[in-house]
Image: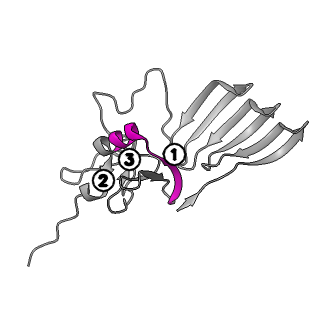
C-alpha cells in the first residue's frame, strides 16, 4: 500500500506564493489547473479528480463563487432541479443514456461492467474499504484515509461488498 504524501506545483511564483496560471496537484491526485493569486485559487480554474470528475469554477481568494461539477460519465450536477436518481427514477445515468437491460440482467452500478472488489472489501465510491484494517484505498490501491467509526458503519450498512456480487450461473450437465 502506497501512502500519498506532499503536493506539487508547476507555475509562476511571486514573493514565495503561487501567482498567475499554474497547476497544483494535491496528495490525493486531484489537480487544480487555473489562475492563482497570492497563493490561493483566484479566477477561472478547474479541479480534475482522479476518477475523471471535473469541477470548473470561478474562484475569489480561494473560495468558489460559481461552478459546475461534471461526473466522469458526462452527467452534470445541478444543485437546482436535480433530476438524476430521484425518488421516482432510480436509473443509473448510463441507463438513461443507453436504456435498461432485460429482466434478470440488471445493472448494479453506473460502471458496466462494475469494478471488481477485492475479497472482504467494499466499494465505497472513491475506492475500496477493508473493514479489517479500516483503510480506504483508491481504485489504484493507493492509500486515501482511515475510516472513523461513523464512516465504517455507513460503508458496512450501505456499500456493495465483494461477496454480494451474484456470479453467473453455469449450465448444468
Q: What range is drawn magenta here?
A: 141-155
Q: Secondary structure at mark 2?
A: strand
- Left or right: 160 as drawn, with respect to 67: left
Q: Could you tell which of marks 1 and 3 lies nearer the N-terminus?
A: 1
How many C-alpha atoms fall within 10 Å of the one at disc 2: few (<14), some, or many (≥20)? many
Which residue does the image show at 34% across and 48% down from the upper left? 109
x, y percent for residue 155: 35, 43
Residue at the right extreme, as displayed: 15
Numbered badge on residue 161? 2
The residue pinned by badge 1 equals 72
For marks 1 and 2, give the one nearer the viewer: 2
Q: Residues within 10 Å of mark 1 (few under 14, many from 20)?
A: some
Q: Residue at x 49, y 31 (%)?
A: 77
Q: Secondary structure at mark 1?
A: loop
- CA distance separating discs 1 and 3: 11 Å
Is 129 on the left-hand or right-hand side of 100?
right
Label placed on residue 95 = none
Q: Is residue 172 above or below residue 74?
A: below
Task: Tell me where residue 116 appears, x and y as whole percent.
Answer: 37, 61
Give the residue displayed 23% in from the left and 63% down from the top.
167
The image quadrant where one finds the C terminus is: bottom left
Label 3: element kind:
loop
Residue 120, horizontal then vertical, whole percent: 32, 59
Q: Which residue reaches farthest bottom?
A: 173
Of residues 158 and 135, the one nearer the viewer is 135
User: In this picture, is 127 found above or below 76?
Assistant: below
Amino acid at each position: 500500500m502506497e501512502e500519498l504524501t506532499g503536493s506539487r506545483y508547476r507555475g509562476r511564483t511571486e514573493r514565495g506564493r503561487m501567482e498567475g496560471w499554474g497547476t497544483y496537484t494535491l496528495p490525493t491526485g486531484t489537480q487544480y489547473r487555473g489562475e492563482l493569486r497570492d497563493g490561493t485559487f483566484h479566477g477561472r480554474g478547474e479541479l480534475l479528480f482522479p476518477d475523471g470528475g471535473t469541477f470548473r469554477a470561478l474562484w475569489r481568494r480561494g473560495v468558489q463563487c460559481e461552478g459546475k461539477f461534471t461526473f466522469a460519465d458526462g452527467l452534470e450536477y445541478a444543485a437546482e432541479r436535480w433530476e438524476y436518481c430521484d425518488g421516482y427514477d432510480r436509473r443509473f445515468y448510463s441507463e438513461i443514456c443507453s436504456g435498461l437491460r432485460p429482466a434478470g440482467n440488471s445493472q448494479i452500478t453506473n460502471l458496466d461492467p462494475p469494478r471488481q472488489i477485492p475479497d472482504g472489501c467494499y466499494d465505497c465510491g472513491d475506492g475500496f474499504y477493508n473493514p479489517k484494517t479500516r483503510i480506504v484505498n483508491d481504485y489504484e490501491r493507493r492509500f486515501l484515509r482511515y475510516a472513523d467509526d461513523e464512516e465504517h458503519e455507513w460503508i458496512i450498512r450501505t456499500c456493495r461488498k465483494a461477496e454480494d456480487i451474484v456470479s453467473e450461473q453455469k449450465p448444468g450437465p
